Amino acid sequence: MDNGQNLVRERDIKLGDVGHTIILENEHVRIWEVRLEPGETIDFHMHYHPCVIISLNGDANLVETIFGDTRDTFEPMGKTLWFGDPRPIHRLHNKSDVTYVSRLIELLHIEWKIDGTMVKGSLSAAETPDGSKAPELSKEVSDALEEILIQTDDLEWSPKSLDGLYQKMLWRNEATGASIALIRFDKGVGIPSAHLHASNQFMYCLKGKYRYIPTGITLVPGSYYCNPKGCVHGPTIADEDSVFLEIYDGPHYPVKPDWYDNEEDAT
């Protein structure tokens, strides 16, 4: 894949970061804030990891590649994008008269080389942006990754068998159980019992106020929460109507919890 590295060298362009400020970073994810005032443009940059982008505020944007190709995008609050494949070096321009703010969540378990090819094992420090190394990926995981564009407003909220809990499934790997979804709790609804998960759980709050009753941990818009595999937590309660982006890197539960009446709701 020609992602534009030759043009970068020819034009002596210094590539920038994929975002402006790192909000959180651990072994699984790196979360950036992207903030562009009206008329502002982020520097040309390259993505080294698959990522999820969640718009917190915005309108009309323009994507320009290093080759000069342009594409209009519309990214109002709540718009979610998933990028699972390498893409040409590019930059983003805010065409609107409102501030564009988003969270860009890089999934660090996959890295791409400078030429944009996927790596299913370790990279040398010279080939990575930060010197980190990626773990070996199974064929099932790598084969499940593809470029997806979903207009989340076009999806209907699907009710689960726990009254007041809904989801919009954005991506799922049937081989591993990993998934990315939007989750909604009505006010007064929560997970009724202490529980644990069979994989790592990552939650980013888009709306509302969601509380873990025993500890008092409360998620509000902009909160990121990670619950490691096997860690007991809950019960929980939504003090307001609440919406999250929820990511699992494997199956949700070791066995179906008793607040669901079918196996599908537990995945």
Image (spheres, helix red, strand yellow):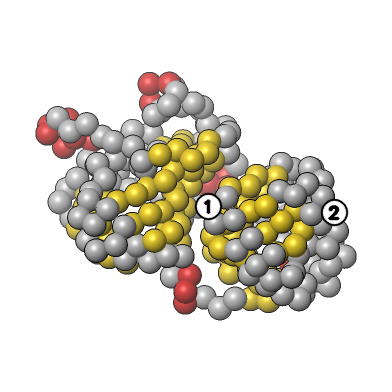
> Which label is found at residue 110?
none
Where is residue 223 drawn, in percent x and y?
57, 50
Give the side of residue 158 with respect to residue 87, left or right: right
User: What residue is shown with label 2?
Assistant: 194
Where is residue 229 drawn, in percent x and y?
74, 43
Number of residues whose C-alpha sits closer than 10 Å to that of mark 2, classed few (under 14), some (14–19) or many (20 or more): few
Quadrant in which residue 10 is drawn:
top left
Which is closer to the viewer, label 2 or label 1? 1
Q: Residue at x 58, y 69 (%)?
A: 168
Of the numbered discs 2 and 1, the one sitting upstream in the chain is: 2
Q: Residue at x 87, y 65 (%)?
A: 258
Q: Amino acid at mark 1?
A: Gly
Where is residue 152 drawn, in percent x and y?
48, 70
Question: Quadrant of the image for the N terminus?
Answer: top left
Give the side of residue 249 with respect to residue 163, left or right: left
Quadrant in which residue 8 is drawn:
top left
Is 72 drawn above or below residue 161 in the view shown? Answer: above
Instruction: Assign a secondary structure to mark 1.
Output: loop
Where is residue 30 drawn, in percent x and y?
50, 39
Q: In this view of the protein, which residue sits in the foreground, 67 or 191? A: 191
User: What residue is shown with label 1?
Assistant: 222
